[in-house]
Amino acid sequence: MALEHAILVSLLEKPGSGYELARRFERSIGYFWTATHQQIYRVLKRMESDGWVEARDVPQQGRPDKKEYSVADLGRAALSSWLHDPIEPESVRHDLAVKIRGAAFDDPAALIREVERHRQAHRDRLEHYLAGEERDFTGPEAGATAPGAPPDAERELQHVVLRGGIAYERMMIGWLDDVLATLARFGPGR
Amino acid sequence: MALEHAILVSLLEKPGSGYELARRFERSIGYFWTATHQQIYRVLKRMESDGWVEARDVPQQGRPDKKEYSVADLGRAALSSWLHDPIEPESVRHDLAVKIRGAAFDDPAALIREVERHRQAHRDRLEHYLAGEERDFTGPEAGATAPGAPPDAERELQHVVLRGGIAYERMMIGWLDDVLATLARFGPGR
DNA sequence: TCGTGCTATGCAACTCGTTGCATAGCAAGT
DNA sequence: ACTTGCTATGCAACGAGTTGCATAGCACGA
């Protein structure tokens, strides 16, 4: 399980509340990990009772109070130990691939719309990633780090992960084009 | 949930026992879906009691008997209805990406070996996929289907899914090279 | 004959993740 | 006054998926 570790990384990058974490998991962290607020609150609670993180009540004006979490020494140690443990390469789960093979026993042409919808979703994500790259990772050349910005290593590693997301979306778009061309060959000739 | 649907597709391609299904999930179906024998047995049982599949006892010589499952009408209908329902594009989970961003708070150089291990695993899978493609999808040209072989649509759709696996592995290898180059920049200069 | 290993099926306990629902403060529009 | 919507946290129940263990037949080699 890596959710706790994803939370540790995110809190090290910047402390925040459960709610804030949930929103990050819809954006930058969401490039490679997803979680609902439920799961985040539950895991945060466990992490707090394990001494991995510490909570601090922060009153806010115009909004409900929040609990701001930050990483404790035990959490840093746990992360470090996990980083040094080897993990297995992830196994894949593609509903869409099941559908594509299943289409052989139904109407292949009926799947075209669905595949087009997925292609569009991946195009949207790609645009979103590219906009984020433009915003966060272009501009001041190496060395000229803006004040308050994260140090070089952190920035560079965030960037390479984002490039992974971009490569993934580009690959998917190309493959879905291949799928569409294949499905088209069975639509009319059926 | 698509496990039941993945099982339906696999049984339509060829009837088989729970054990045989588990092995297919380690090979061709495993390109895009994984499941342990536990899950398969449990789901098969539910599917049988729902009337989606039918079991037939098959005595074997030199081996324990097996229960061979095949798809019933209700199962075919359930698959068809699922195929016509839209699904959400899958969300991603990459432990390795968590580690890479986490490396900013530890020793980036220590991650190099792990990334190299993953790169090798993806190279192995790519080789495996390419061998499968060579074996199953080259040779007799379109139209000249061998006797007993699955019909054109089934074959073509299996092939396009395999091409997806190949594209995925190639993308991963390329990205992991990018990751290694990035990590290398922080190893010596740390 | 004893261990190893493959086929074949299954139970029990657990963790992970999702969904539905509930609460509560405050802002802004109608 | 009422509704809508955002921040913020949480419970309860369920379903999906993993892990450890157990059983049993048979083959094969040391």
Image (spheres, coloured by chain):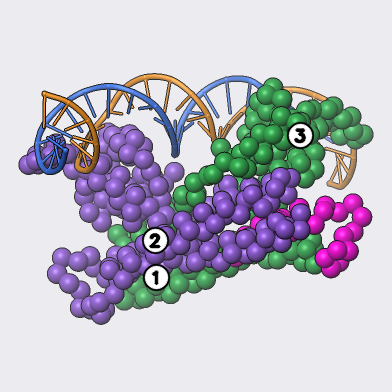
Chain colours: A purple, B green, C blue, D orange
Relative to the observer, which residue lies in front, B147 or A58?
B147
Q: With respect to residue B119, does B21 lie above or below?
A: above
**Of tags 1 and 3, which is closer to the observer?**
3
Label annotation for residue B183: 1
Query: Which percent across, then down, holds residue B31?
Result: 64, 53
* C-alpha separation, residue under disc 3 versus residue under disc 2: 44 Å
Disc 1: host chain = B
- Which quarter of the picture shows residue B2? top right
Q: Amino acid at mark 1?
A: Leu
| Residue B71: assigned label | 3
Residue A32 lies in what quarter of the image?
Answer: bottom left
Q: Secondary structure at mark 2?
A: helix
Query: As drawn, is A139 to the left or to the right of A80?
Result: left
- In the image: residue B87, left or right of residue B103: right
The residue under label 2 is which amino acid type? Ile
> Does B185 sit left or right of C30 as displayed?
right
Q: Residue at x 26, y 37 (%)?
A: A48
Whole-Å distance between the Cαs marked 2 and 1? 9 Å
Instruction: Check residue B100 in the rendering and tell me which mark sits there, or answer none.
Output: 2
**Which residue type carries mark 3?**
Val
